[in-house]
Amino acid sequence: MEQPPQVHPSRLVTTPAGERVDVDEGIWPLVSALWARGWTTVGSCQDMGEAIGRAGAAPPALAELQRGRAWLKMPNAHADAFLAAAAQDPELAVLIRPRLDRPDHWHCYTQRGPAGLLPNAQIYLPASQIGRVVAVLRAGA
């Protein structure tokens, strides 16, 4: 499968499953903290709005909605465990509750296909919160 071109500075890393993948520098600390907890990531981006905007395939309003937001794609069970762990922090517990009218809140999605829920959830969080999330995950490990 051909990978899309990298939009952000990235590093080539080896996943826990032994695959070599590019991970954006800005989200690498979070991805590595997730892997350290035994959770899988399927995709990630340090600023999804910027990536959408550069690709030019989606409406500009979508790029603007996601500007400044990091993105994670994770298996549903791993995403749920990650959100539960992050919610142990009282400040993050409030921010994880989705509110589209609040730019500091997270957006979490899973979709349903003909056979039921699709296997992966998508999580969008302000990139400015990555450091706090990493600290919470490492403290709870």
Image: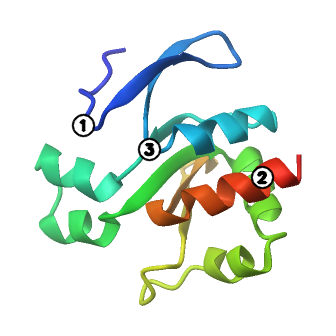
Please tell me which of labels 2 and 1 falls first in the chain: 1
Residue at image x 43%, y 36%?
Answer: 25
Distance, label 3 to label 2, CA atoms, is 17 Å
Q: Which of pointers 3 and 2 lies earlier in the amino acid sequence?
A: 3
The percent position of residue 67, horizontal first and vertical second, equals 29, 64
- Residue matched to label 1: 7
Determine if residue 114 is in view. Answer: yes
Identified by mark 2, the residue type is Leu
| CA neighbours of label 1 inside 10 A, class few (<14), some (14 to 19), many (20+) | some
**Residue 32 x, y percent position in the rendering:** 65, 34
In the rendered image, the quadrant that contains the N terminus is top left
- In this orientation, does residue 57 appear? no
- Report the coloring of the rendering: rainbow
Residue 26 relative to residue 60: left or right = right
Q: Are marks 3 and 2 in contact (CB under 8 Å)?
A: no
Q: CA distance from mark 1 to mark 3?
A: 12 Å
Q: Nearer the viewer, residue 118 or 52?
A: 52
Q: Position of residue 110 (x, y in %)?
A: 57, 58
According to the picture, the residue beneath numbered tag 3 turns out to be 26
Indicate the secondary structure of the residue bearing disc 2.
Answer: helix
Seen at 42% across and 81% down, the residue is 103
Q: Position of residue 122 (x, y in %)?
A: 53, 54
Figure check: 98 above or below 68: below
Instruction: Identify the residue under disc 2.
Output: 137
Q: Looking at the picture, tell me which residue is in the foreground, 123 or 15.
A: 15
Which mark is nearer the camera, 1 or 3? 3
Secondary structure type for disc 1: loop
Q: Nearer the viewer, mark 2 or mark 1?
A: 2
Dot 2, how many residues are within 10 Å of its Cα: few (below 14), some (14-19), or many (20+)? many
At 64% from the left edge and 74% from the top edge, which residue is drawn? 96
